[in-house]
Amino acid sequence: MRIDGLYLNGCATAYPATRVPLSLAVEQGLLHDADESLGDPQVPVHDEDRPAADLAVDALEQTLKETGADPREIDLLLHCGWWHQGWDIWSAAHYVAHRTDALGALPVNLSQGCNAPMAALELATRSMLADPGVRTAAVTASDAMLAPRVDRWNLNYGCVHGDAGTALLVQRGPAAGNSFRILSVASTAAPELEEMNRSGLPPTSGPALRGDGTVDLKAAKKAYLTQYGIQGFTSRSGASLTACVGRALEDAGLTGAEERIRTVTVPRLSRKIFDQVYRPLLGPFFGEHKLRWQGGESAHLGVADVGANIADTHARGELNPGEVTVVVNAGGGYTWSCLVLEAA
C-alpha cells in the first residue's frame, strides 16, 4: 500500500534495568541447546513486580517527550502484546492510554504475534487515510517473557527472548529530529501455517496448562516438521517474504537497488537464521551490505523488534534526509511484512 502524507515520529524503546549476558546464562546452564550463532547479547529481563504493559507506557512517555506531542490529541492507540501483559481479562491498551493521559484515544489491543506492530501500522495508516478526523495514532508494544510460565532461554528455536517496550506516533506532519515519511507497507500471510505452533498438542482451557506449566513452542514445531517436512514451510515462507518486499518496494516507487536505500533491518534472531534465510532472500533486492543483523545486541524482543529496529536506525544516525530504511518482519501465523521509510 502506497502511503502519502503520513509520518512515523518519535519511535522509542524502553528496556528494563536488568541485563543478563547470554554467555552468563550459558555458563549457568540455563540454555539446554547452546547455539553460538545467537552471539552474546545483553538480554533485557523485566522486573516481575511491574506489569509488562509498563514497558509500553515508558516507551510512549519517551515518544511524547521527544516529539512534544499532546497525548490528548491521540485519537487511536493500538497496543501490541504477544504474552501476558499484567492482569487477566483486562485491556492493556486502555491501561497504556490511561497511564499516558491519552484519554481521548480509542484503545485497541492487537494479538498478532511478533508481527503485531506491522499490522498496527497498516491499520493506523488506513484509518488516517480514510478519516481526516484522526489526528494522531499511537502504536505501542510490550512483552516480558517471565518464568515460570515462559522459559525465555529455551522457548523457541533460533533465539532467546528479551523484554522491551516500544512506541511511535503516526502523524500528518514530521516531528523535529526523529521522523520518517512512510512510503509504503505491505504484508502477506500463509494461514495454513498456524498449525506449526500447535502441531501434535491438544487444546487447553487456558495458557501454560500443559506438562510442567511452561509454554513449549519447540515441541509443536518439531511435531509439525516431523509430519510435513521443512521443504514446504521453507518454500511458502520464502515466497511470502519476497512477495511482500517486492510489493512494498513497487508501491514506494523503488526497486531495492537505489543507493539512497541505506539499511534493511530484519527480526532479531540468530546469525544462522540471518545467514540462511534473510541474507539469500533479501540480498538480491538490496545487496547484502545493506542488511543489518541485530540479534546479537538484545536477543529477540518479540513484538518490540520492529520498533527497536526503527529506533536504533535513527539513533545510529545512518540516514540523511531523503534516504531510506526498509524494515522487514515476520510473525507466527504466519505473516510477513515490509515497511519502507524515508528520513524526514
Image (cartoon, rainbow, N blue to C red):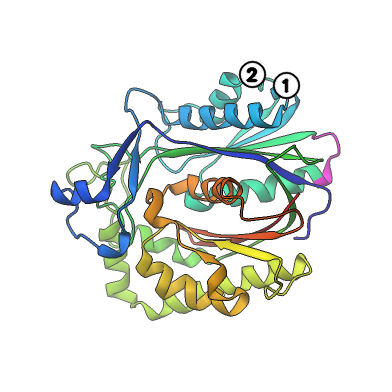
Q: Single out the residue that lies furthest toward the right.
A: 132
Instruction: Give the amino acid type for the residue marked by disc 2 in the picture.
Output: Asp
Residue 111, percent from left and from top:
51, 44
Is the residue under label 2 in contact with that under label 1 (CB below 8 Å)? yes
Majority secondary structure in the magenta region: loop
Residue 314, percent from left and from top:
61, 48
Q: Quadrant of residue 319?
A: bottom right
In which quadrant will I find the N terminus? bottom right
Residue located 74% across and 37% down the image: 176
For mark 1, give the secondary structure: helix
Instruction: Give the amino acid type for the residue marked by disc 1 in the picture.
Output: Arg
Residue 211 located left or right of residue 76: left
Residue located 83% across and 48% down the image: 5
Q: Nearer the viewer, residue 105 or 325?
A: 325
For mark 2, give the secondary structure: loop
Crowding near the residue tagged with mark 2, few <14, some 14–19, many ≥20 C-alpha atoms within 10 Å: some
The answer to if 132 sits in the magenta stretch is yes
Residue 279 position (above or below residue 29):
below
Q: Which residue matches tag 2?
A: 101
Crowding near the residue tagged with mark 1, few <14, some 14–19, many ≥20 C-alpha atoms within 10 Å: some
Residue range corresponding to the magenta coloring: 129-134
Q: Which residue matches tag 1?
A: 72
Residue located 20% across and 59% down the image: 34
Q: Nearer the viewer, residue 218 or 307?
A: 307
